Amino acid sequence: MQFNADKGALSIIEKINKAGYEAYIAGGAVRDTLMGRTPHDYDIATSAPPEVIKRLFSRTIDTGIKHGTVTVVCNKTGYEVTVFRRDGKYCDGRRPESVEFVTDVREDCMRRDFTINAMMYSPETGILDLCGGREDIDKRIIRCVGEPEKRFTEDALRMLRAVRFRAVLGFDIEAETERAIKKYAVLIKKVSKERILEELNKILLSEHPDFIRDLHRLGLLKFIIPQLDKCFGEPQRNKYHIYDVGEHIMQTVKNTPPDLILRWAALLHDTGKPCCPSTDANGIIHFYGHHRESRRIAADVLHRLHMDTASIKDIALLVENHDYRVEPSFAAVKRMMSKTGDELFEKLMLLQKADNLAKNPKHYPEKLKRINSAMSIYRQVIASNQPYRISDLVVNGSDLMKAGYKQGREIGDTLKSLLDEVIIDPELNTRSRLIRRAAEMKRKRFK
């Protein structure tokens, strides 16, 4: 087959070859090209040491010089160029503490994680496949290079990467590789939270985000998000549900569009349920207050995974309100919008759609009708620029102070009260009317 490679990568390889060294497009870019997918980036493996690469190319960045990696900038695109290496000493299932540079491309192939990522390509040699990667692509399996136990004890993140590649590619994990993951799952605790978060994000943004369930099946999830792991097998015995909590969550995640904030909210929206089940006299299970417990868990999990503060805030807000019934009225929609803002309100409605789609289908048409009606009102609010935030009021704290208010909580409470009235009747949002209403509120407080 014809191998259509990136021109920038090929020009780098050509220049390295002319200097007397080997160079190949390596790993995922080869795999994706063979599968007819567009690679996201191109990594280059070479026998040339970093100092040679820096001498050959005018624009380079020392992105991982300790591990033999230099980024070459070509046509405003960065290409990671790494010298052939043999991984040295590992520390407790983490990244290698040291590496040994080698000149044999075969040694570099044999230290890689999975066969589908161990292929190389250059125009001179064509595809170099020493580990059976092309055959495993045809079989649609993820298989370790060499002994799976050795690969996972070298770097435990590879276990999570196996699930990620399964979610991204839709492949199965080969039996021996899967058995090794189950055996060494506990080692994932030694991997940095940042690396784990990166892999989880990639799973959630894949075409199969519900393959997160594999982390539970393989024993990894209890060491990563134990609160979510406990959801699998937790019964939901009521007329609205047909799955246990864990599978309901997976179906909800599957039903959401590929937005990271939305899919994290879907993943964590019911994690509080195992903490608060109660069974009534008819044997019906209820989960009173689970939205608040789920919000607490979501914030805790995401802080522990070192997610950024702004994203945690948005996800927690979605989780807390995922079960809130927004009535299809202008006042109700705008009150929720005052909590979420416009963009997050739309995500909340998408989350509620996904959540209800993962329940008993008998009740979905009624739920969908209400959500769609609320969305229609939301669009009208945006289109007509109706006020729904305190910042939309034509008066502010300074105006109230001029009207006799003292700085402090009283001003904030008054602005909230004014907003409540304006949400119901936008015509009240004039300076004269709001100042008059503020004065009336102040007089009532002192009666």
Image: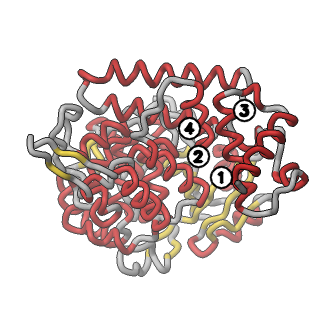
Say which element carries label 4: helix
In the rendered image, which residue does mark 4 sit on?
336
Residue at image location 70% in from the left, 63% down from the top = 53
Q: Picture quarter containing residue 351?
A: top left
Q: Name the residue under label 1.
A: 79
The answer for how far apart the CA atoms under marks 1 and 4 are is: 46 Å
Instruction: Say whether marks 4 and 3 touch (CB < 8 Å).
Output: no
- As drawn, is 326 to the left or to the right of 15? left
Contact (CB < 8 A) between labels 1 and 4?
Answer: no
Q: Position of residue 380 (x, y in %)?
A: 65, 20
* The disc label shown at residue 41, or none: 2
Q: In this view, does 274 lie above or below 172?
A: below
**Cα gap from disc 3 to disc 2, whole angstroms:** 45 Å
Q: Identify the amino acid type marked 1.
A: Tyr
Q: Residues within 10 Å of mark 2 (few under 14, many from 20)?
A: few
In the image shown, does 183 or 446 lie closer to the viewer?
446
Judged by depth in the image, the label closer to the viewer, 3 or 2, is 3
Question: Which badge, 1 or 2, comes first in the chain's sequence?
Answer: 2
Going from N to C along the chain, the mark reached first, 4 or 3, is: 4
Q: Are marks 3 and 2 in contact (CB under 8 Å)?
A: no
Label total for image: 4
Q: Which of marks 2 and 4 is nearer the N terminus?
A: 2
Amino acid bearing label 4: Met
Do the residues under discs 1 and 2 have CB atoms within 8 angstroms?
yes
The residue carrying mark 3 is 387
N-term mark: 3 or 1: 1
How far separated are the C-alphas under marks 3 and 1? Answer: 48 Å
Q: Identify which amino acid the numbered label 2 is placed on.
A: Asp
Does residue 39 appear anywhere in the picture?
A: yes
Residue in view at x 41 percent, y 73 percent: 94
* Nearer-the-camera pick, 422 or 219: 422
Residue at 40% x, 54% y: name it: 292
